[in-house]
Image: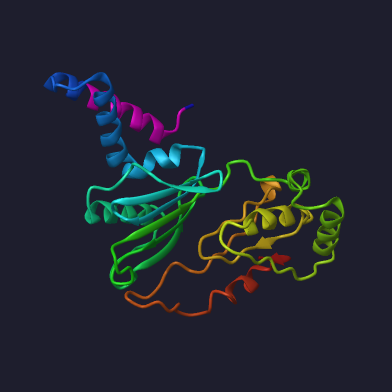
Amino acid sequence: MPSPNRRLRSTAKEELTRIVDAEQVPLTPEERTRLVQDVADDVLGYGPLQRLLDDPAVTEIMVNRMDQIYVERKGKLTLAESRFSSEEHLRKVIERIVSKVGRRIDESSPLVDARLEDGSRVNAVIPPLAVGGSSLTIRKFSKTPLTVRNLIDFGTLTPEMAELLNACVKAKLNIIVSGGTGTGKTTLLNVLSSFLPHDERIVTIEDAVEPADPAGPRGPAGKPPAQHRRQGRGDYPGTPPQLTPYAARPDCGG
């Protein structure tokens, strides 16, 4: 069954097509289709970013400014043809992304890490923190998480390394996963979580939750830092968020 959002987009595109046809706008069929798609994306999606988000070959989107958007495909960066019409247009899309996850971004809080509905990681920066105009980075995640078998087949891990990591998890040893952006930290963490016994309770602490527990119904007891902050200030009221999960009786924390 189509999702409500997909049905809404379909209905809106049909209505837009009807309006364009009724106005008898002198456009070629290709131009008419592009116009309807652009309006639908701008009203119901994320504007010029929507097609890039829908493109499975795109793994990362980097908006340096309103008229400069780079995308990553197969590990290579290229300048995209898409662009925003103005700084205000870019800000509206950023605010739409942020508001959907219950966050805010303004001059008093000009930096936000958030997640899209599909799990993509978002980092947005606006003036006065961003000097040359607002910037936005979206890192997309695979809809099918990689397994330990995948990592062994890719040559990322050897069977012996996987066996050692499995033993470390089962022995409840502390494990630090570190690395630069896009190096596979979340992928490895998801693999490590697959080694956890199904009867253990997991608590994760992260500003924008990324780990996808592969163990099914058990699920992690996600406790990211509180999004509730005092207006205009960056500090957390009450108990520090790093200490709060200890009251949730975790068997394992991440």
First to last magenta residue range: 2-17
Q: Let me know if residue 8 is in the magenta part.
A: yes
Prevailing secondary structure class for the magenta stretch in the rendered image: helix
Q: Residue at x 58, y 75 (%)?
A: 242
Percent position of residue 218, x then y = 69, 50
Percent position of residue 110, x then y = 34, 68
In this image, 238 relative to 177: left or right?
left
Percent position of residue 230, x then y = 37, 76
Q: Residue at x 23, y 27 (%)?
A: 16
In the rendered image of this protein, does residue 74 appear above or below residue 197?
A: above
In this image, 215 relative to 101: left or right?
right
Q: Residue at x 18, y 19 (%)?
A: 21
Nearer the observer, 100 or 159: 159
Q: Is residue 15 visible?
A: no
* Quarter of the image where the C terminus is located: bottom right
Nearer the observer, 1 or 13: 13
Percent position of residue 139, x then y = 50, 52
